[in-house]
Amino acid sequence: MKTMTAFRSAIEAAPIVPVLTVYEADHAEPLAEALMKGGITSAEITLRTPAALEVIRRMSDAFKDFLVGAGTIISEGDVDAALKAGSDFLVTPGTSPLLLEALGSHDGIILPGVATASEAMARFDEGFGVMKFFPAEAAGGAKFLKSLAGPLPHMDFMPTGGVTPQNAVDYLSLPNVIAVGGSWIATKEEMANGDWAAITEKAKEAVKIGRSV
Ligand code: 3PG
Protein backbone atom coordinates (compact mmCIF):
# COMPACT_ATOMS: atom_id res chain seq x y z
CA MET A 1 0.00 0.00 0.00
CA LYS A 2 1.15 3.54 -0.73
CA THR A 3 0.93 6.49 1.67
CA MET A 4 -1.74 9.17 1.81
CA THR A 5 0.91 11.64 0.60
CA ALA A 6 1.40 9.54 -2.56
CA PHE A 7 -2.36 9.41 -3.04
CA ARG A 8 -2.70 13.16 -2.62
CA SER A 9 0.06 13.91 -5.11
CA ALA A 10 -1.28 11.43 -7.69
CA ILE A 11 -4.73 12.95 -7.61
CA GLU A 12 -3.45 16.50 -7.55
CA ALA A 13 -2.49 16.07 -11.20
CA ALA A 14 -5.87 14.54 -12.04
CA PRO A 15 -8.43 15.06 -9.26
CA ILE A 16 -11.04 12.84 -10.90
CA VAL A 17 -11.15 9.24 -9.72
CA PRO A 18 -13.12 7.01 -12.10
CA VAL A 19 -15.42 4.64 -10.22
CA LEU A 20 -15.36 1.48 -12.29
CA THR A 21 -17.61 -1.56 -12.14
CA VAL A 22 -15.80 -4.04 -14.36
CA TYR A 23 -17.33 -7.31 -15.51
CA GLU A 24 -14.42 -8.84 -17.46
CA ALA A 25 -10.96 -9.39 -15.98
CA ASP A 26 -9.53 -9.03 -19.50
CA HIS A 27 -10.66 -5.41 -19.51
CA ALA A 28 -8.19 -4.53 -16.75
CA GLU A 29 -5.20 -3.58 -18.92
CA PRO A 30 -6.96 -1.84 -21.85
CA LEU A 31 -9.19 0.06 -19.44
CA ALA A 32 -6.30 1.35 -17.31
CA GLU A 33 -4.39 2.17 -20.48
CA ALA A 34 -7.32 4.13 -21.89
CA LEU A 35 -7.62 6.13 -18.68
CA MET A 36 -3.89 6.82 -18.43
CA LYS A 37 -3.82 7.96 -22.06
CA GLY A 38 -6.37 10.55 -21.01
CA GLY A 39 -4.21 11.70 -18.10
CA ILE A 40 -6.02 9.91 -15.28
CA THR A 41 -3.73 8.65 -12.49
CA SER A 42 -6.05 6.54 -10.34
CA ALA A 43 -9.23 4.47 -10.35
CA GLU A 44 -11.58 2.89 -7.87
CA ILE A 45 -12.69 -0.63 -8.79
CA THR A 46 -15.97 -1.47 -7.08
CA LEU A 47 -16.19 -4.90 -5.50
CA ARG A 48 -19.53 -5.51 -7.17
CA THR A 49 -18.59 -8.07 -9.79
CA PRO A 50 -16.91 -11.47 -9.63
CA ALA A 51 -14.08 -10.05 -11.77
CA ALA A 52 -13.30 -7.05 -9.52
CA LEU A 53 -10.46 -8.52 -7.45
CA GLU A 54 -8.75 -9.95 -10.52
CA VAL A 55 -9.07 -6.55 -12.22
CA ILE A 56 -7.38 -4.88 -9.23
CA ARG A 57 -4.63 -7.52 -9.29
CA ARG A 58 -3.99 -7.15 -13.01
CA MET A 59 -4.09 -3.35 -13.06
CA SER A 60 -1.69 -3.07 -10.13
CA ASP A 61 0.68 -5.65 -11.62
CA ALA A 62 0.72 -4.05 -15.05
CA PHE A 63 0.89 -0.36 -14.11
CA LYS A 64 2.94 0.43 -11.04
CA ASP A 65 2.38 4.19 -11.27
CA PHE A 66 -1.38 3.92 -11.61
CA LEU A 67 -3.16 4.02 -8.23
CA VAL A 68 -5.69 1.21 -8.06
CA GLY A 69 -8.25 1.39 -5.29
CA ALA A 70 -10.97 -0.97 -4.19
CA GLY A 71 -14.46 0.46 -3.64
CA THR A 72 -17.68 -0.86 -2.11
CA ILE A 73 -15.71 -2.21 0.84
CA ILE A 74 -18.41 -3.20 3.30
CA SER A 75 -16.98 -6.10 5.34
CA GLU A 76 -13.82 -7.41 6.94
CA GLY A 77 -13.65 -10.00 4.16
CA ASP A 78 -13.67 -7.22 1.56
CA VAL A 79 -10.83 -5.42 3.35
CA ASP A 80 -8.67 -8.56 3.42
CA ALA A 81 -9.45 -9.56 -0.17
CA ALA A 82 -8.87 -6.06 -1.54
CA LEU A 83 -5.51 -5.72 0.20
CA LYS A 84 -4.44 -9.20 -0.90
CA ALA A 85 -5.29 -8.25 -4.50
CA GLY A 86 -2.84 -5.34 -4.24
CA SER A 87 -5.18 -2.37 -3.78
CA ASP A 88 -3.39 0.94 -3.25
CA PHE A 89 -6.37 2.44 -1.43
CA LEU A 90 -9.72 1.40 0.01
CA VAL A 91 -13.02 3.27 -0.26
CA THR A 92 -16.18 2.46 1.69
CA PRO A 93 -19.73 3.77 1.18
CA GLY A 94 -20.19 4.10 4.95
CA THR A 95 -19.02 2.31 8.08
CA SER A 96 -20.38 -0.25 10.49
CA PRO A 97 -18.71 -0.98 13.85
CA LEU A 98 -17.37 -4.27 12.47
CA LEU A 99 -15.99 -2.65 9.32
CA LEU A 100 -14.33 0.10 11.37
CA GLU A 101 -12.63 -2.55 13.46
CA ALA A 102 -11.30 -4.24 10.30
CA LEU A 103 -10.14 -0.93 8.82
CA GLY A 104 -8.49 0.05 12.09
CA SER A 105 -5.97 -2.75 11.82
CA HIS A 106 -4.53 -1.36 8.56
CA ASP A 107 -2.54 1.80 8.10
CA GLY A 108 -2.82 2.19 4.31
CA ILE A 109 -4.91 4.71 2.42
CA ILE A 110 -8.50 4.40 3.54
CA LEU A 111 -11.36 6.74 2.64
CA PRO A 112 -14.36 5.84 4.77
CA GLY A 113 -17.75 6.96 3.51
CA VAL A 114 -19.58 9.70 5.44
CA ALA A 115 -22.73 11.71 4.80
CA THR A 116 -23.13 13.85 7.94
CA ALA A 117 -21.06 16.23 10.09
CA SER A 118 -21.22 13.80 13.02
CA GLU A 119 -19.94 10.89 10.93
CA ALA A 120 -17.11 13.03 9.58
CA MET A 121 -16.15 14.14 13.11
CA ALA A 122 -16.19 10.55 14.36
CA ARG A 123 -14.04 9.27 11.48
CA PHE A 124 -11.61 12.17 11.91
CA ASP A 125 -11.21 11.33 15.60
CA GLU A 126 -10.45 7.76 14.56
CA GLY A 127 -7.62 8.99 12.36
CA PHE A 128 -9.19 9.36 8.92
CA GLY A 129 -8.27 12.74 7.43
CA VAL A 130 -9.76 12.18 3.98
CA MET A 131 -13.24 10.76 3.57
CA LYS A 132 -15.55 9.78 0.77
CA PHE A 133 -18.65 11.99 0.85
CA PHE A 134 -21.36 9.59 -0.30
CA PRO A 135 -23.92 9.73 -1.83
CA ALA A 136 -22.73 13.23 -2.67
CA GLU A 137 -25.59 14.72 -4.67
CA ALA A 138 -28.34 13.00 -2.69
CA ALA A 139 -26.77 13.95 0.65
CA GLY A 140 -26.57 17.68 -0.02
CA GLY A 141 -24.04 18.10 -2.81
CA ALA A 142 -21.41 20.81 -3.01
CA LYS A 143 -23.54 23.10 -0.79
CA PHE A 144 -23.25 20.63 2.06
CA LEU A 145 -19.46 20.33 1.78
CA LYS A 146 -19.13 24.11 1.54
CA SER A 147 -21.05 24.40 4.82
CA LEU A 148 -18.74 21.87 6.52
CA ALA A 149 -15.60 23.78 5.50
CA GLY A 150 -16.45 26.53 8.03
CA PRO A 151 -16.55 24.55 11.27
CA LEU A 152 -14.49 21.55 10.06
CA PRO A 153 -11.74 23.01 7.82
CA HIS A 154 -9.25 20.31 8.83
CA MET A 155 -11.11 17.53 7.00
CA ASP A 156 -10.86 16.66 3.30
CA PHE A 157 -13.37 14.87 1.12
CA MET A 158 -13.73 12.96 -2.11
CA PRO A 159 -17.39 13.29 -3.11
CA THR A 160 -18.91 10.47 -5.16
CA GLY A 161 -22.44 9.58 -6.11
CA GLY A 162 -24.14 11.77 -8.68
CA VAL A 163 -21.00 13.69 -9.67
CA THR A 164 -21.07 14.60 -13.37
CA PRO A 165 -18.91 16.64 -15.78
CA GLN A 166 -21.46 19.42 -15.20
CA ASN A 167 -21.26 19.63 -11.42
CA ALA A 168 -17.66 18.42 -10.85
CA VAL A 169 -16.33 22.00 -10.82
CA ASP A 170 -18.73 22.99 -8.01
CA TYR A 171 -17.06 20.36 -5.84
CA LEU A 172 -13.49 20.76 -7.04
CA SER A 173 -13.48 24.49 -6.36
CA LEU A 174 -14.13 23.88 -2.64
CA PRO A 175 -11.11 24.01 -0.30
CA ASN A 176 -12.06 20.74 1.41
CA VAL A 177 -12.38 18.63 -1.77
CA ILE A 178 -9.23 16.88 -2.96
CA ALA A 179 -10.88 14.91 -5.79
CA VAL A 180 -14.24 13.76 -7.09
CA GLY A 181 -15.22 10.23 -8.02
CA GLY A 182 -17.59 9.26 -10.78
CA SER A 183 -18.69 6.36 -12.91
CA TRP A 184 -19.44 8.42 -16.05
CA ILE A 185 -15.89 8.14 -17.39
CA ALA A 186 -16.25 4.47 -18.32
CA THR A 187 -19.70 2.98 -18.75
CA LYS A 188 -20.67 -0.67 -18.78
CA GLU A 189 -21.54 -0.41 -22.48
CA GLU A 190 -18.24 1.20 -23.47
CA MET A 191 -16.30 -1.50 -21.65
CA ALA A 192 -18.45 -4.27 -23.15
CA ASN A 193 -17.89 -2.83 -26.64
CA GLY A 194 -14.18 -2.28 -26.07
CA ASP A 195 -14.68 1.39 -26.87
CA TRP A 196 -11.43 2.43 -25.18
CA ALA A 197 -11.11 5.52 -27.37
CA ALA A 198 -14.37 6.93 -25.99
CA ILE A 199 -13.11 6.34 -22.46
CA THR A 200 -9.83 8.12 -23.24
CA GLU A 201 -11.79 11.09 -24.60
CA LYS A 202 -13.90 11.35 -21.45
CA ALA A 203 -10.79 10.95 -19.31
CA LYS A 204 -9.18 13.87 -21.17
CA GLU A 205 -12.29 15.99 -20.63
CA ALA A 206 -12.34 15.09 -16.94
CA VAL A 207 -8.69 16.02 -16.50
CA LYS A 208 -9.40 19.32 -18.25
CA ILE A 209 -12.21 19.99 -15.78
CA GLY A 210 -9.81 19.25 -12.91
CA ARG A 211 -7.22 21.63 -14.30
CA SER A 212 -9.75 24.42 -14.89
CA VAL A 213 -10.29 24.89 -11.18
C1 3PG B 1 -20.61 4.45 -6.45
O1 3PG B 1 -20.02 3.89 -5.53
O2 3PG B 1 -21.51 3.95 -7.10
C2 3PG B 1 -20.10 5.80 -6.80
O3 3PG B 1 -20.39 6.68 -5.83
C3 3PG B 1 -20.41 6.24 -8.20
O4 3PG B 1 -21.56 6.97 -8.26
P1 3PG B 1 -22.03 7.52 -9.70
O5 3PG B 1 -22.41 6.32 -10.51
O6 3PG B 1 -23.19 8.41 -9.39
O7 3PG B 1 -20.86 8.26 -10.29
Image (cartoon, grey):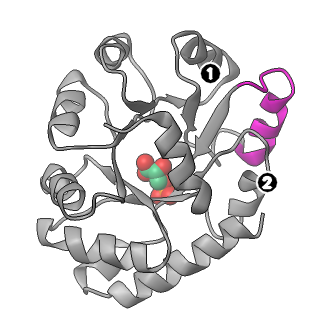
Magenta residues (range):
141-154
Q: Position of residue 46 (x, y in %)?
A: 31, 50
Give me the residue at 42% from left, 87% from top.
198
Say which quarter of the image contains residue 27.
bottom left
Which SS type dominates the magenta stretch? helix
Residue 211: say if magenta: no
Q: Amino acid at mark 2?
A: Ser
Give me the residue at 12% from left, 54% from top.
54
82 and 63: which is toward the camera? 63
Give me the residue at 55% from left, 49% from top.
9
For marks 1 and 2, give the CA distance: 20 Å
Which quarter of the rendering shows the N terminus?
top left
Q: Crowding at label 1, few (<14), some or many (≥20) Cα neighbours within 10 Å?
A: many
User: Which residue bears the numbered disc 1?
Assistant: 120
**Element at label 1:** helix
Classify 160 as above or below 170.
Answer: above
Tag of residue 173: 2
Residue 149 located left or right of residue 43: right
Residue 149 in sight:
yes
Q: Position of residue 2 (x, y in %)?
A: 37, 39
137 and 130: which is toward the camera? 130
